[in-house]
Image (cartoon, rainbow, N blue to C red):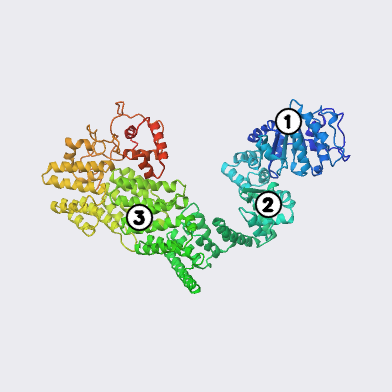
Amino acid sequence: MSAVAEWEDSGPEPASPYADPHGDPYLRTRFAVPARPVTFLRRERLVRHLDQASRTPLTMVNGAAGAGKTLLVADWAAARDSVAWLTAERTDQSPGMFWAYLLQALRPRVPALPDAVGSPADPSLVTHTLLARLAAELSARERPVTVVLDEYDRVADPEIAEQLDFVLRHAGQGLRLVLVTRTEPLLPLHRYRAAGELTEIRGGELAFTPQEAAELLELHGLRLPEPAARALVERTGGWAAGLRLCALAAREDPDPQTYLKEFEADRSPVADFLLAEVLKRQSAETQDLLLRVSVLDRFCPELADTLTGRADAGPLLAGLERENAFVEHLGHGWYRLHPLFGEILRAHLRMRSPGLESELHRRAAHWLRHSGSLVETLGHGAAAGDWEFTARALVDDLAIGQLFTGLRSDELAELFSRMDPGTHGPAADLVRAARELAGCDLDRGLAHLDRARQGLQELQELTEARHASAPDDDPAGLAAARLSCALLEALAARLTGSPDRAETAGEEAGRLRSTVPAPLLDRHPELLALLLTHLGSTRLWAGRYEDARAALSTAAGAPGEASTALPREDSLGRLALIDYLTGWPGRAERRARAALTETERFGLAQPAGSGMGRLVLAAVAVDRDELDRAQALLDAAPEAHPALRDPVMAAGRAVATARLHLARGDTRAALAAVERLVPADVPSPWAEGQRALVASAAHLAAGRPETAAGLLRPVLEGHAACAVEAARAHLAAGRPAVAADLLDAVRPDAGLGPAVTVRATLLRAQVAHEAGDPARARGLVAQALREARRELLRRPFHEAGPWLRPLLDSAALRGPAAGWLTPGTASPGTLTPGTPGTPAPAPGATPLGTTPLGTTSRGTTPSASLHLGAPHLGTPSLDGSDRPPPVVEELSGRERDVLVRLAQMMSTQEIAADLYVSVNTVKTHLKSAYRKLSVNRRNEAVRRARELGLL
């Protein structure tokens, strides 16, 4: 039975008038619930929401044309009794006509509606008595009747809204009203909302999800993968009519999937629908406004007025938003177009007004430039083809650093890759220089930088000539351009290994900083962070560790934003390298781990950082005799960001690689790693020292101590590690007195770390041993063990030679070495890997004694190789078995970081400072780790983690 027939057969109507107040027959189709097409998709989440209509007096389904409002409510209504349906018409603008039709819709659902209620006789009015009688009759019902008013946006008379509100309030539980509308009804919604008496379904909820879109397409005989469905929903905004029209058109195409992915919106049925249903219904002024703002991703009335040249955008946009005319209010006075509508309007604009689009982009760019929206300014400037303006906007805003760091660096680089080669000026040259240097193209980058510097100098001279009476007056943008130039100069100095050039750039930046508005600097912390990182890196290359540490520490402390993630990561990695070079592997490890988290936590694409953190961790792993881990770290170290491929990075990779080869006994590969030329304007003292150290160790391993000592002679001054290695060579050459003199010059109070002092102490022990003083030798070895244990420095003991084995086997030293350096369990009263403060060996580390001291499985000497074997897990489990209880749940990376620091006897506050997190965060990680390890105290957690080989 059809919906109209059902209405006709719903019961006798003895008192029902045949004609409306005009004397015309009632149009029964207006009372019929619309039929659903066979491809209709019932969306249960919306049906469940509509079910709330039975609990609130008022329900509003509000959405744009084609949003699926009517079909949703029709499907819901068809499954329920006591639902009266009325589709509004433009003819319902008078109260009498509206209420006559509404009463007629009610009569089949309320057969007992008494004659006394009556029916309006005058199309222009309805009496208050009629409304009161109707409300009273409805309020007396045991079960409520639901009235659906479809297309209620056609009813614009405020008097009708007041009358509806009156009846709804006084009908009590006897009436439920559902409004289906494109616009906000004139009813006092705020009052219903505050009282909890309003159910709302709006455009955002009506939009199809990707899964629903895929199901809808299946009903049309089309199967679409989830990513393709997601892309289609993104393009259509989940708009129901758009999806259905696309599906119908795709069915007629030989390649439906390609059509749905690439269809031209302006040549599709969607365009016909939107142009007819939305655009052509508007006034000429509104149509012009919509076409012009279609070039914008978002807009406010002031910006829209700039594009139209009028001053009426405010009320027009507010009206379009109220009408759900595919204009969405974003808040704070900003709007945007539905994406598909905007796409169609842009195509219509190009057809109607060729050439206007570029001018609109130009106007938008200039307006946005003054409003402080740089991202949109650059986009519209580029779209307008005004590259001189676009480059100047980037430089004047002090945002040139965003070409190197942040979430938008790739996007900006791609945008400026389209810059017209004919565009000239200092700003354009600076941008070109930044792009080339960011890609590590030094020749082209430096050429553009020279032109930019010359252009800025000429501009400065011209400015001074014009403002002779006010020499301090710097025109807007010139100071920012000169500071940007200083940044690029510092980068060029870093990439070329030129410390003097970097210092000059730093001094220039220091002078210019006070001439740039402070809010501008605050808005772009990445510029100074990058500049300090470049300056610190060149100081590091020059071997000026303390000066480098000062600049890099300041950069590492920059605000924790995505824009500064790369310089913070880079600075922390280089601070870690300084710690490693000065013999502090524990500090180096902590800083290197902190560096790794900087770019990872912002999800920056690889290669996002320098990779220095992993290189330092690899070098530390070699010192700890963890060769498998070192190799894995070297393999995982990404190729550095092009702008960070400087001599420090090249030398750091060479050092880590060479030390790993030495530890494995491959002296030829070690020498090849450090002999590769690192191009730089000036040599680096520490890089030369590290090269000499590797070469000396290789010759010493080959039995050539004289050659080894000779290689180190030119780099002894100021290099304690080289002095220690030279002492080892002289001792091997039979000159213990010379070795002792060299070791005496290595002062323990010179800030040297255990990686240096442990080796020096072991050599002193060897001198004493060869001099026939076993007591002093044992004392010095015990001292070396104490220093090395906290850092897990195994490598110096492997390098020491066969004289050390008998001492380590002695009763006095067996305990301190057991568990982390040699097999076995420590004797009572000594620190062992099961005691807080001493880490356990990592997988890949070999305790001394698993292979005869002095040889390896490959027959090489220990000074150039490492013994590989199974890890020793330390003390037995608490229950007396050899197998520790399993972890119920795997520890996270951060929980392991906290446990490592617990094992180093660090306090909660120290761990928080070391990991750059809050104390509360550390406590949270501790509680989680305790739970997973089934312990309650710090020392138990460390012991259990070591037993399980987790540390």
For the residue labelled by badge 3, is the local secondary structure a helix, a strand or a loop?
A: helix
Q: Which mark is residue 172?
A: 1
Q: Quadrant of residue 88?
A: top right
Which residue is identified by label 2? Answer: 317
Q: Residue at point 73% right, 52% down?
A: 282
Q: Quadrant of residue 624?
A: top left
85, 924: nearer the viewer: 924
User: Which label lies toward us, 2 or 1?
Assistant: 1
Question: x, y percentage for residue 228?
Answer: 58, 44
Question: x, y percentage for residue 581?
Answer: 29, 52
For the residue labelled by badge 2, is the local secondary structure a helix, a strand or a loop?
A: helix
Which residue is identified by label 3? Answer: 550
Q: Which mark is residue 208?
A: none
Relative to 413, is 158 on the left or the right?
Answer: right
Q: Earlier in the sequence, mark 2 or mark 1?
A: 1
Outermost residue on the right side: it is 23
48 above or below 754?
Answer: above
Q: Residues within 10 Å of mark 1 (few under 14, many from 20)?
A: some
Identify which amino acid the numbered label 3 is placed on.
Ala
Relative to 919, is 275 on the left or the right?
Answer: right
User: Which label lies toward us, 1 or 3?
Assistant: 1
Identify which amino acid the numbered label 1 is placed on.
Gly
